[in-house]
Structures are given as structure tokens and as C-alpha cells.
Amino acid sequence: MVRKISHVAIAVKSIDQAAKFFVGQLGLEIGGREHVPTNKVTAAFMEVGDSRVELVQPEGPDSPIAKFIEQRGPGLQHLCFEVDDIDAELRRLDQAGVQLINRTAVAGAHGCRVGFIHPKATGGVLIELSQPPPAGSHPGR
């Protein structure tokens, strides 16, 4: 089951441009950038209490984030919940008839395994489920 909100993701055309506000005006710190090949994006995370804000920049025109920005413009892209067992959660949701984008987990940022729930199943919000790697196994977390 869901343990906590992991992060809120914001689709941006440029992390550098977005950082002018988040870092310059809000005083947040970007904890580094990570290429996420499964989603064709670069992600930058900013810690906010026990959660994070993720800036997600497309790496090319075929990135899902590029398509999102083209259709809806930059802005809130998804909400991510941390779970203990991503495989069990995706299996449970699939068996319950929930429309999933991923029936099996894929590699995400920081060594996490992730799966997405289609916005049609959630009232319009893209939901990511994320299982963190075992403690100490990924330096970016």
C-alpha cells in the first residue's frame, strides 16, 4: 500500500529556466540531475521536508514529457506515491481492473522501480507508484 507522497513532478521545457524560480525565488536546492532513459527525460529533484519536487525536462521530441508540454503546456505532470512492493501493487490494481500504463515496473530515477496509473482511472491525474531501492544501494537518494 501507499507509504507516503514521494514527489510532485512538474514538466518543464528547461530545468535551468525553471530553476530561476524554484532556486532563485523559493530558495530550494537542486540535488543533481539524472537521465532517465525509460522516459527519455532529465530529472532534477528538490527536497521539501519529507517529500520532493521533481522538474522533468524532455530529452527530445519523442519524449512523453515533450508530448505532454506540446498538448498541455508546462506544469504539474504527475503525483508519485511511494510503495513497499511495486510488483504487488501493480498486480493488485490490474486485477481490480484499474487502467495502468505499466503492468510491470520499469526503471525510474534514483534506482527506483516505477509504474504509472492512467489518468482515466484517477479522475484526470497521472499517478506514479515508486518503490525505492534497498537502503544504501543508490547514492542519489
Image: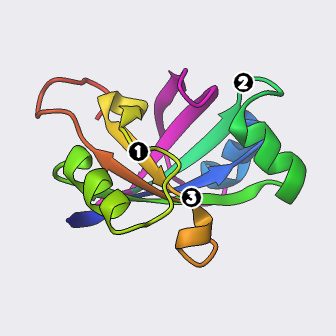
Report the side of 21 relative to 55 (left or right).
right
From the image, state whether disc 1 or disc 3 is nearer to you.
1
Q: Which residue is mark 3?
A: 78
| Precedes in sequence: disc 2 or disc 3 | 2
| Precedes in sequence: disc 1 or disc 3 | 3
Query: How busy is the neighbourhood of tag 2: few (under 14 within 10 Å), some, or many (20 plus)?
Result: some
Give the total of numbered labels: 3
Q: Which mark is residue 103?
A: 1
- Amino acid found under the numbered disc labelled 3: His
**Per the image, is 74 magenta?**
no
In magenta, the rendered stretch is 25-51
Q: CA distance from mark 2 to mark 1?
A: 24 Å
Query: How busy is the neighbourhood of tag 3: few (under 14 within 10 Å), some, or many (20 plus)?
Result: some
Query: Which picture quadrant has residue 109?
Result: top left
Residue 44 position in % (x across, y down): 53, 37
- Amino acid found under the numbered disc labelled 2: Glu
Query: Which picture quadrant has residue 77?
Result: bottom right
Report the side of 96 relative to 60 (left or right).
left
Residue 127 position in % (x across, y down): 49, 61
Q: Secondary structure at mark 2?
A: loop
Q: CA distance from mark 1 to mark 3?
A: 18 Å
Residue 29 position in % (x across, y down): 49, 44
From the image, state whether disc 2 or disc 1 is nearer to you.
1
